[in-house]
């Protein structure tokens, strides 16, 4: 019986050490090609108020009067994320900070360039988990690369929807 408790203690110790050593900050950069002009990509990525209409994970956006700060309310998990624009150089560069109380704080950089009749975006997200529980939840349930790619997939669909709407005018 004592051997079993020793094995449980060793496993528990390994889990605790792993959690402590797990990095609090992760940084992911993904490069994505859009078959659209740079202005169209910029307009969709910076039209924060419309995002509940085309992003599957956003329930609501509350814009501040300065239009440089807002809160996104996510559908699942139910979370409120604050954003603030730090730097904006249309249509090439957007830098924002983001955060959710006691969960994470981070920085988002979008750099767009025209290339071969389309647009290439380099999207970098850096997020710091604020505590062990958010670190574990991120490790278990959140894939930063997949999030960036899904955001781009939905943005591409919105760009096409806007192009089709403009063609019908």
Image (cartoon, rainbow, N blue to C red):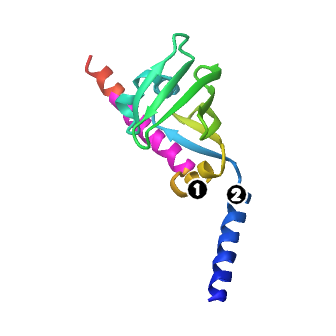
Q: Which residue is mark 2?
A: 22
Looking at the image, the residue that sits furthest to the top is: 65
Q: Is residue 37 visible?
A: no
Is 141 on the left-hand or right-hand side of 20? left
Quadrant location of the N terminus? bottom right
Residue behind mark 1: 139
Q: Nearer the viewer, residue 7 or 119?
A: 7
SS assignment at label 2? loop
Give percent across and percent down for residue 42.
52, 25
Please tell me which of labels 1 and 2 falls first in the chain: 2
| Marks 1,2: beta carbons within 8 A | yes
Which residue is depicted at the point 65% across and 52% down? 132
Instruction: Identify the image quadrant of the C terminus.
Output: top left
Q: Residues within 10 Å of mark 2 (few under 14, many from 20)?
A: some
Q: Which residues are magenta?
A: 144-161
3 magenta-colored: no
Identified at 68% across, 82% down, the residue is 6
Judge by depth and name the residue closer to the eye, 74 or 37.
Answer: 74
* Closer to the camera in the image, 84 or 38: 84
- 88 over 160 or under it: above or below: above
**How far across and down, in percent of the image, does residue 58 sit?**
41, 34
Q: Measuring 55% from the left and 53% from the top, which residue is drawn there?
A: 137
Is residue 21 visible in the rendered image? The answer is yes
């Amino acid at each position: 019986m004592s051997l079993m408790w020793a094995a449980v203690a060793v496993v528990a110790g390994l889990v605790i050490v792993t959690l402590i050593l797990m990095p609090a900050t992760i940084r992911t950069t993904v490069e994505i090609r859009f078959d659209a002009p740079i202005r169209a990509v910029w307009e969709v990525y910076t039209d924060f108020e419309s995002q509940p209409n085309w992003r599957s994970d956003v329930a609501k956006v509350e814009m501040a009067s300065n239009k440089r700060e807002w809160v996104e309310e996510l559908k699942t998990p139910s979370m409120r994320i604050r954003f603030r624009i730090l730097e904006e150089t249309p249509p090439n560069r957007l830098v924002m900070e983001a955060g959710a109380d006691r969960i994470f704080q981070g920085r988002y950089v979008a750099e767009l360039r025209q290339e071969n009749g389309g647009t290439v975006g380099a999207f970098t997200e850096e997020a710091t988990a604020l505590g062990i529980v958010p670190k574990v939840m991120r490790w278990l349930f959140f894939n930063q690369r997949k999030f960036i790619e899904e955001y781009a997939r939905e943005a591409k669909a919105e760009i096409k929807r806007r192009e089709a709407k403009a063609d019908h005018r």
